[in-house]
Structures are given as C-alpha cells and as structure tokens.
Amino acid sequence: MKRFTVKTITAGAMLVALGVIFSFLRIPLTNITEITLTGIPVAVGGFFFGPIVAAVIGALIDVLGFFVHPVGAFFPGFTISMAVTGVIYGGFLWRKWWTREDGQGILFKKNTGLLLRVVIAHFLKTVLISLILNVIWLSIFYGMPAEAVFAGTIVKEAINFTIEVALIFLIIRALYRLRI
C-alpha cells in the first residue's frame, strides 16, 4: 500500500503549514505552560492518512515551527512528543479502519462513534504526552521538579481538553462531509 502519494504529500504539507501558523498563536498560562492548537492538524492528518503520516506531520510541525517562530532553545523531546501524538491520533481516528468496503462509514451515521474516538484519542494524548512525556521534557529543559511542572500542566490540560476535542471533532466531521 502506498502511503506517500502526491495527494498525501500535498495535504500533509498544507497541514504542516497550518500547524506552523498555529504555533504563532500561543496563550501563555505560566512561564512554562501555554495553550496552542498545533495538535489539531496532527489529528486531522491522523484521520485522513493514518498514524505514520500523522507522526511525520507532527514532527515537521514542531521542527519547522521552531525555525519559523523560535521560542527558547530547540529541544528534540518535544519533536518526539508531537510524533507520538500523530501515532495516537492516527491509531484511533484513521478513517480507513472505520469504513466499510463500500465506502459507507461504520460509525459516522450519528457521529457518536467519531466523537467517542476523538475523546479517547485526546485523553490518551493528554495523559501520555502532555502529563507524562512533556512534564519530563519540561523538567529536564528548565531544571525544575516534575511536580511543579505537573501542577501547571494539569491546569492547562483541564482548560484545553474540551476545546480541542470539540474543534477536532467539528473539523474532521466537516471535512469528511465535504468528501475531502
């Protein structure tokens, strides 16, 4: 199976560009935590192209976002986090795993299946990436105790969870209905 077709590369590049633009839109909560929307293009890439392409999209968003809009020093741990985020979203959202051979969606009739998958994927991303990996990366990067970093991160994720789940669900549903 070909993963990197012209359509995949073109759409992936557009998602990377959108993610880099989203990296400019930051809402700082503390000195080390901020709200960004860079995970949304990764989730959309995971839905349309699967975990491998979404991992590449996530890693490229992180690296290119740093070069276009550097905030502090580059830390490769965050690139790993974005790539793993792509694997999580692609694993739970990839539409080929949830579509019958005749092209009809298995769980898209009432959108409850898609919403449930978005909630589960985002919950896993929140726990594994934001609350574990990124806390480790931030405590290494800033030399702070992990407990202090965790306290700020949990507040950010509590604010961010519902907003990102709603945005990811609405964007994917709209793009799917447009047959993109």
Image (cartoon, grey):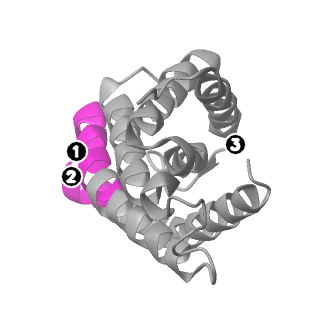
Q: Is residue 62 magenta?
A: no
Could you classify mark 3 by the number of other residues whose Cα lies within 10 Å: few (under 14), some (14-19), or many (20 or more)? Answer: some
- Element on which disc 1 rests: helix
Between 119 and 33, which is closer to the camera in this rendering?
119
Question: Amino acid type of disc 2?
Answer: Ala
Q: Are marks 1 and 2 in contact (CB under 8 Å)?
A: yes
- Element on which disc 2 rests: helix
Q: Position of residue 56 (x, y in %)?
A: 44, 28
Which residue corresponds to the image point at 35% horizontal and 24% vertical from the top-left? 75
Which residue corresponds to the image point at 46% horizontal and 29% vertical from the top-left? 3
Q: Which of disc 1 and disc 3 is earlier in sequence?
A: 3
Q: Are marks 3 and 1 in contact (CB under 8 Å)?
A: no
For mark 1, what is the residue? Answer: 136
What is the magenta range? 130-150
Q: Position of residue 21 (x, y in %)?
A: 71, 33
Residue at far top of view = 67
Side of 117 relative to 163 (left or right):
left
Side of 144 relative to 90 (left or right):
left
